[in-house]
Image: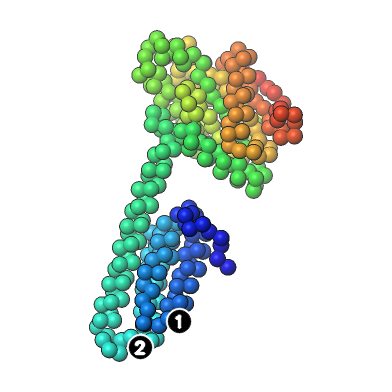
Amino acid sequence: MLPRVNLLELYTLGYQRGLLVALLLYVATATLDLVTGIEISLGALYLFPILIATWNCGGRWGLVFALIAAVTQASIGLFNGYTQSSPGFFIVDNANRLATYLLYVLLAHQLRRLYDDERDAARVDDLTKVRNRKGFREVMQHEIYRHARSGKPFCVAYIDCDGFKSVNDSRGHSVGDELLRAIAVTLQDQLRRSDTIGRIGGDEFAVIFPETEGASLLALMTKVRHALTDVASPYGPVTFSIGMVTFPSPPEAADRAIHLADRAMYRAKASGKNGTVWDVYDPNAPQTVTRPRLHSGT
């Protein structure tokens, strides 16, 4: 049974659904081609499974479907006695058809690469080269979906640079930009490759920690805070306030998770800055009050 797919969403099917849709379209096209015989050419219809496979599954699968489509059409031609009048024309005709399919695979593969490059660029912060808010939200939403399937908790940390405005005001925006880049590099050095770092805006960063408990993360974030303070010390009296939230159950949306971590960060700032507040998400508490609350300023 063909999956329910909006034609406008064929370019976002993903690997498994894309392969299934391409295969079913190929079978339907080949069956129709066999039934109609050689009087009607259905060569253009084979392009649909070829392009869907190339776009969603990669160039190799596009080549596979191109070869299968060409062999299928040649076999149907042989079955219907197409070579009896002109075998040479039959060979040239099928060779040209295969070349056309391969050209479409090449073009679709190159377009997909350009599309992926542009999409990734739109989700990366130009200054720090970590994810921007849009890219971070997308990763957060994927993490929420994964958590809903696996049941494994994850954590979100929100980091604010205390005193960043004074750096900009006293030493200029170019020095402020240099500090932001140093913060991003330090976070990348201190954290795991599986953790996602994003610049949410201005001097605020956030991190997603997949499959991580907050208790084990508190010591790490204290270490990270000290490393950030050491890196920022040449720029002036700069410290860092961090809000952390553990999610044993998934929040409603990515923005909700970011908001809760942001709220914990503001409590860290209200407690005197240069500290960490850790909360645990509880969707059943009034107004989603979190539990427990821990502040670490050491």
Give, as a three-letter code, the residue at label 1.
Answer: Val
**Quadrant location of residue 223?**
top right
Query: Residue at 30% across / 67% down in the picture?
Result: 100
Q: Which of the labelled discs sits on residue 81, or is there none?
A: 2
Q: Nearer the viewer, mark 1 or mark 2?
A: 1
Q: Secondary structure at mark 2?
A: loop
Q: Residue furthest bottom?
A: 84
Query: Which residue appears at 27% of the width and 85% of the height?
Result: 87
Q: Position of residue 252 (x, y in %)?
A: 64, 38
The quarter of the image holding the N terminus is bottom right
Can residue 151 be seen here? The reply is yes
Q: Amino acid at mark 2?
A: Gly
Considering only order in the chain, which callout, 2 or 1, is on the residue closer to the N terminus?
1
State the image coordinates of residue 97 (x, y, percent, origin top left): 31, 72
The residue depicted at 27 percent of the width and 89 percent of the height is 85
Is residue 76 depicted above or below 235 in this figure? below
